[in-house]
Amino acid sequence: MKVLAFAASSSTKSINKTLANYAASLVTGAEFELLNINDYEMPLFSQDREEELGQPQAAKDFFAKLGEADAIIISFAEHNGTYTAAYKNLFDWTSRIDQKVFQNKPVVYLATSPGPGGAASVLATATNSAQYFAADVKASLSIPSFYDNFDMETQKLTNAELDDQLKTAVAQLTE
């Protein structure tokens, strides 16, 4: 089984990237790839740019990468209650190739933030719209207060209850 994991963030210090990497490492018997959405940077999407540029190769490559995976793990960063601009732009361009962006793949949606909200707003938005983009959401989980619940040195969740919830969530990718 091949799992594709990524953070919906362009930050080089993304805690969501750290969480996605940890979550992917928990999928029993799977090979995983941690994707960096910065490798798929494109101009800001607009109808005018689409008419001018067509479909950028980076969007085609991202769509193909999603298609090659057996399962997908995304950890969403939250900017002002919603998607980061970098992820939203990549998503917008990719959805113009095919609205079924996630190609009926099983996915686990995660989110975290340094604060107690755990990026729950963006997670709810992503989960609620998943059906329109052919994401078979097996589980979603918000990790609040990331630095209180995750040990950056060992790269593991230290909160046993949250760790059990995460293990249960990612296990659903192989069922």
Image (tube, helix red, strand yellow):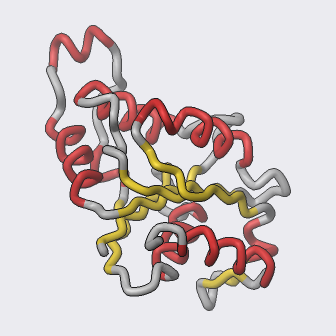
Residue appearing at x 81%, y 51% in the figure: 117
Measured from the top left, where is residue 161 in percent x and y? 80, 78
Q: Is residue 21 above or below residue 125?
A: below
Residue that lies at the very extreme toward the front in this rendered image: 175
Measured from the top left, where is residue 175 in percent x and y? 47, 71
Q: Quarter of the image containing the N terminus?
A: bottom left
Describe residue 94's horizontal placement relative to residue 91 as left or right.
left
Where is residue 46, by image quadrant? top left
Residue appearing at x 33%, y 29% in the figure: 99
Describe residue 85's horizontal placement relative to residue 94 as left or right.
right
Describe residue 159's horizontal placement relative to residue 26 as left or right.
right
Residue appearing at x 57%, y 61% in the figure: 16
Measured from the top left, where is residue 123 in percent x and y? 65, 45
**How many marks can you see?**
0
Q: Is residue 103 above or below residue 43?
A: below
Where is residue 30, by image quadrant? bottom left
Q: Is residue 137 above or below residue 99?
A: below
Nearer the observer, 166 or 12: 166
Measured from the top left, where is residue 21 in percent x and y? 48, 73
Residue appearing at x 53%, y 68% in the figure: 172
Residue that lies at the very extreme toward the right in this rendered image: 116
